[in-house]
Amino acid sequence: MVKICCIGAGYVGGPTMAVIALKCPDIEVVVVDISEPRIAGWNSDHLPIYEPGLDDVVRQCRGRNLSFSTEVHRHVSDADIVFVSVNTPTKTCGLGAGKAADLTYWESAARMIADVSVSDKIVVEKSTVPVKTAEAIEKILSHNTHRRHGGGGGVRYQILSNPEFLAEGTAVADLLSPDRVLIGGRNDTPAGLAAVAALRDVYARWVPPDRILTTNLWSAELSKLAANAFLAQRISSVNAISALCEATGADVAQVAHSVGKDARIGPHFLSASVGFGGSCFQKDILNLVYICECYGLPEVASYWREVIRINDYQKGRFVNRVVASMFNTVAGKKVAVLGFAFKKDTGDTRETPAIDVCKGLLGDKAAVSIYDPQVTGEQVSRDLAMNKFDWDHPRHLQPITGTDVAGQVAVAADAYEAAREAHAVCILTEWDEFRGLDYKRMFDAMHKPAFIFDGRNVVDVAKLREIGFVVYSIGKPL
Ligand code: NAD
Ligand code: UGA
């Protein structure tokens, strides 16, 4: 029986391994993590992440061929294939701070693999990493093994790059039916080819052969960064156009639809918004920018940096619109924020645009009342008290010096409570339930003039104006 161990039981490690276990009942899959609460969550009825359909998959496999454990060393030692799916955040200090990927967690996982391994292993990069990381990992693994075995022979490793392309909120569907699975390896050696074939065999149980792509290591590593950069670039492109729409009277939804009808452009990923969020787009583009700078390609670096600049501009533009519309001050005014997660169908708030918008409003002394169906009050307080980039680093190392929000922030049980006696409503996540709200009921309970600022284009502007709201919707005629 093949044994797989995945280091890192997060948003990627958990769902990915659950689907592998589901589709390969003859493979034993163990997901390990240094975080005890995370593993306890995976072993409970309340999984540590909210992802539609995931409970079902885990319930079918857990206890059969899927387990979650904090016994990292034992399970890594036993495994034939070790996936590494640890976090690779942006560095907050030292060389490359604010841009480069922090590979501390990756390196410590690699050193641990070298320390505990007594049999040959395929080590799979699942995390998103800078190009050429596999080379560094190879060095760590082979040097440490060499040392442990007194300089002779010992354990042999094959490193593969198998980046993950799932999106949160649709992770299970994406894993069950991926557009492609990418496997990069040393395709110039028999051992490298055998390792690629071994991993391909795992995915081939449910992924059609033409969707399993094999490349060299560096192409696989770079394809992941490039894919995220292209996706984020589409959003920044449509968001840039949204500003022009507002200035000219064009409607961004109509423009995006017309542009997307061109088969060469395609209709997906062209929804204008308050800005993209999530743990990866910004960090991966910054990582790309840093790599370009390191390779002496400043023009390429600045091209990609603009994608983030437009995203920051879009978030700032939204806050300015709110404040300017409300007679240039929101001081002491209650503003309801509907949605705090970075997108619908997830409780994840990493780099959510809601943090920047709320901080902007709080900076202008608004009283903010937040409702999100999947985000707890505790999470909101943590996020609003944190500095940029700090969310993925150990808390005890980080001074909390962010906005002091005591007294200015409340968390509501539903959208109506959030909007009661508010001057304005800001919609920051496109949760389906926000489309079907009784806006007349909200309007009746709000101060007048009652404003709605829709950062996700979920409301029917004409209907809301009929009710009496002053409505601003991204990229729509004012
Ligand atoms: P995450 O923070 O949710 O999970 C990472 C886990 O690794 C944490 O639980 C942490 O405790 C654990 N960990 C860190 N160091 C460890 C060690 N030495 N030993 C054992 N466990 C350790 O992160 P994530 O969202 O799952 O992302 C993981 C990687 O996948 C990142 O590189 C990310 O860029 C990439 N990725 C993420 C997504 C996504 O949608 N979140 C999608 C594709 C790729
Ligand atoms: C994204 C990619 O879609 C995945 O392929 C990739 O694996 C993943 O990043 C990663 O590497 O972490 P994710 O961040 O989970 O997935 O979610 P997306 O659906 O891509 O949305 C990202 C952000 O862009 C969200 O804030 C979303 O609201 C926003 N968005 C998305 C828009 O503003 N407009 C759009 O048209 C699409």
Image (tube, rainbow, N blue to C red):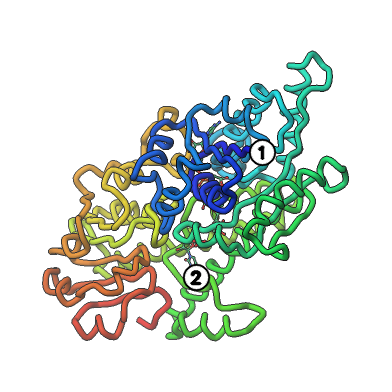
Query: Amino acid type of disc 2?
Result: Asn
On the question of residue 406 being in view, the answer is yes
CA gap, disc 2 and disc 1: 42 Å
Query: Which residue sits furthest top?
Result: 150
Marker disc for residue 239? 2
Dot 2 alpha-carbon crowd within 10 angstroms: few under 14, some 14 to 19, many 20 or more: many
Question: In the displayed structure, does residue 185 sit left or right of residue 77?
Answer: right
> Of residues 363 and 205, which is closer to you in this image?
205
Can residue 398 be seen here? The reply is no
Q: Classify residue 464 as left or right of residue 134.
A: left
The residue to which callout 1 is attached is: 81
Q: Is mark 2 within 8 Å of ligand 2?
A: yes
> 256 or 82: which is nearer to us?
82
Of residue 53 and residue 275, the one placed in the foreground of this image is 53
Mark 1 Cβ inside 8 Å of ligand 1: no
Vertical side of 274 occupied by 368: above or below: above
Earlier-in-chain disc, 2 versus 1: 1
Checking the image for residue 431, the label placed there is none
Quarter of the image that includes the C terminus:
bottom left
Rendered residue at 34%/65% (across/down): 431
Q: Residue at x 54, y 50 (%)?
A: 16
Q: Residue at x 31, y 81 (%)?
A: 461
- Amino acid carrying label 1: it is Ile
Give 127 or 156, whichever is nearer the viewer: 156
Question: Which image quarter holds the N terminus?
Answer: top right
Which mark lies nearer to you, 2 or 1?
A: 1
The spot of residue 235 in percent (x, y) is 53, 67
Instruction: Please say if 291 is above or below 317.
Output: above
Residue 291 placed where, x, y %?
A: 69, 47
